[in-house]
Image: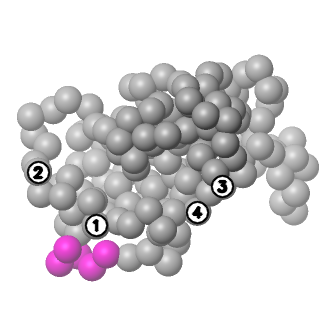
């Protein structure tokens, strides 16, 4: 999966809105992959480990008070609730990255480290798939998406 589109960008965080899923890594992954991923990087065939392409969404009930999570932190948390995280590579568990920018502050990153892995839910997004051989997704508000995902 491409790297750049899934990174957290300083300017979008400062604008108050991230409108995409965030790329993440896991130390150990299954040798399978699920749409929209196009590769696997796992070392074991074991369903206990997530496959490449797995999406995780932060629970809507999760909350950090502003005293522990400033505006920038809240923007990233909202993106994790709305668009989630997509497992895109092997690396540190629950690691997600941002674009290189000297304006990032350690306090911004440290505040996000308060989010526990248990606050995320695995999401089945297969109903959004246009084709198994394409990363293209059905778009919101289309009749095809409504039928495929069982919405009324």
Of helix, strand and loop, which one carries label 1?
Answer: loop
Of helix, strand and loop, which one carries label 4?
Answer: strand
Q: Which residue is mark 4?
A: 121
The part of the chain drawn in magenta is 64-68
Camera-side residue of 79 and 54:
54
Q: Which residue is mark 1?
A: 114
Residue 12, given in percent of the width and then of the height, sits at 31, 42
Q: Residues within 10 Å of mark 2 (few under 14, many from 20)?
A: few
Which comes sooner in the sequence, label 2 or label 4? 2
Q: Residues within 10 Å of mark 4 (few under 14, many from 20)?
A: some
Which comes sooner in the sequence, label 4 or label 1? 1
Q: How far is the residue under mark 2 from the one under mark 4?
A: 27 Å
Checking the image for residue 26, the label placed there is none
Q: Is residue 67 magenta?
A: yes
Q: Is residue 91 left or right of residue 102?
A: right
Of helix, strand and loop, which one carries label 3?
Answer: strand
């Amino acid at each position: 999966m491409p790297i750049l589109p899934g990174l957290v960008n300083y300017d979008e965080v400062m604008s108050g809105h991230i409108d995409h899923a965030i790329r993440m890594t896991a130390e150990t992954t299954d040798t399978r992959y699920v749409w929209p991923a196009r590769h696997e990087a796992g070392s074991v065939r074991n369903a206990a480990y997530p496959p490449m392409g797995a999406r995780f969404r932060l629970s809507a009930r999760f909350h950090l008070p502003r005293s522990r999570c400033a505006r920038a932190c809240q923007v990233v948390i909202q993106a994790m609730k709305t668009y989630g995280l997509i497992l895109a590579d092997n690396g540190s568990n629950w690691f997600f990255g941002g674009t290189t920018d000297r304006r990032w502050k350690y306090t911004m990153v440290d505040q996000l480290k308060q989010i526990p892995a248990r606050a995320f839910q695995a999401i089945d997004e297969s109903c959004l798939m246009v084709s198994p051989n394409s990363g293209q997704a059905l778009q919101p508000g289309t009749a095809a998406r409504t039928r495929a995902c069982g919405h009324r």
